[in-house]
Image (spheres, helix red, strand yellow):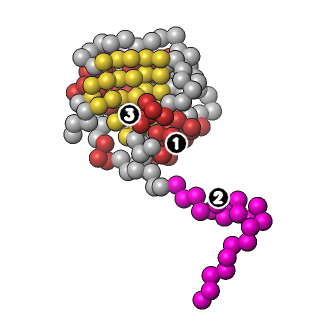
Amino acid sequence: KNMAGTVFATVGTTKFTALMEALDKEELQAALSAKGFKRLVIQTGKSTIVPQKRSSMEVSTYQFKPDLKDDMLAAKLIISHAGAGSVMEALRNRKKLIVVVNDKLMHNHQAELAEAMSEAGYACSSSPSTLLEVIQGFDSQKLTPLPPLDLQPFAKTVTELMGVKEEKKRE
C-alpha cells in the first residue's frame, strides 16, 4: 500500500547514534521511498551524526524544537526512540509507528514498552540493526489505532477533590 507523504524520525532529548546511522543509509532511505514516502524529517537530539540525503527522498534535520507535535501531525509514519513520551504522543495522534529500541541501554524498560505496544498491535518494534527489514515488511493495515483516552475517571477524581457533589440522577 502506498503511504505517500512524510516520515518523521525522533530521538527526543537523547543521543541515539545507532538510529542516526541507520537513517543515514541509502538502503533504508530507498526502502522508505519504495513504500511511497517522499520526505524524511529527522529530529537528531544530541546525536553527532546528522543523516544526509542518500536517495530520492527529501531529507531535513534539526536538533531540537520546543514542541514536536506539528512534525508528528504532518507525518504518515513516525520512527521513534522508545521513550514513553514520544511513543504515547505518536499513538495518541493516531500515527503509524515504528519504535526503535536502543539495545545499547542497560536495564531496558524501553524494550518492554516497545514489545508491549508491538504485541498489542499498536506499533512495530525494531532495533537499529533490524530497522531496514521492519520498514521493508511494514504494513500499516496490520496496526491497530490506540483506543481513545477515557478522561472520565480523571474528571471524576478532580470533581471529588474540588468538593463538587455530582447531581444524583433521579430514577
- Circle 1 packing at 10 Å, graded few (<14), some (14-19), many (20+), is some
Query: Which residue does the numbered mark 2 point to in the structure image?
Result: 154
Whether 22 is drawn above or below 125: the answer is above
Checking the image for residue 28, the label placed there is none
Horizontal side, residue 5 vs residue 74: left or right: left
Q: Nearer the viewer, residue 81 or 72?
A: 72
Horizontal side, residue 119 vs residue 28: left or right: right
Magenta stretch: give its range: 149-171
Horizontal side, residue 144 vs residue 103: left or right: left
Q: How many numbered markers are drawn?
A: 3
Say which of marks 3 and 1 sits in front.
3
Query: Which residue does the numbered mark 1 point to in the structure image?
Result: 88
User: Residue at (25%, 33%) from the top-left corner?
Assistant: 4
Which element type, helix, strand or loop, lies under badge 2?
helix
- Circle 2 packing at 10 Å, graded few (<14), some (14-19), many (20+), is few
The residue under label 3 is which amino acid type? Answer: Ala
Q: CA distance from mark 2 to mark 1?
A: 18 Å
User: Residue at (43%, 17%) from the top-left corner?
Assistant: 61
- Circle 3 packing at 10 Å, graded few (<14), some (14-19), many (20+), is some
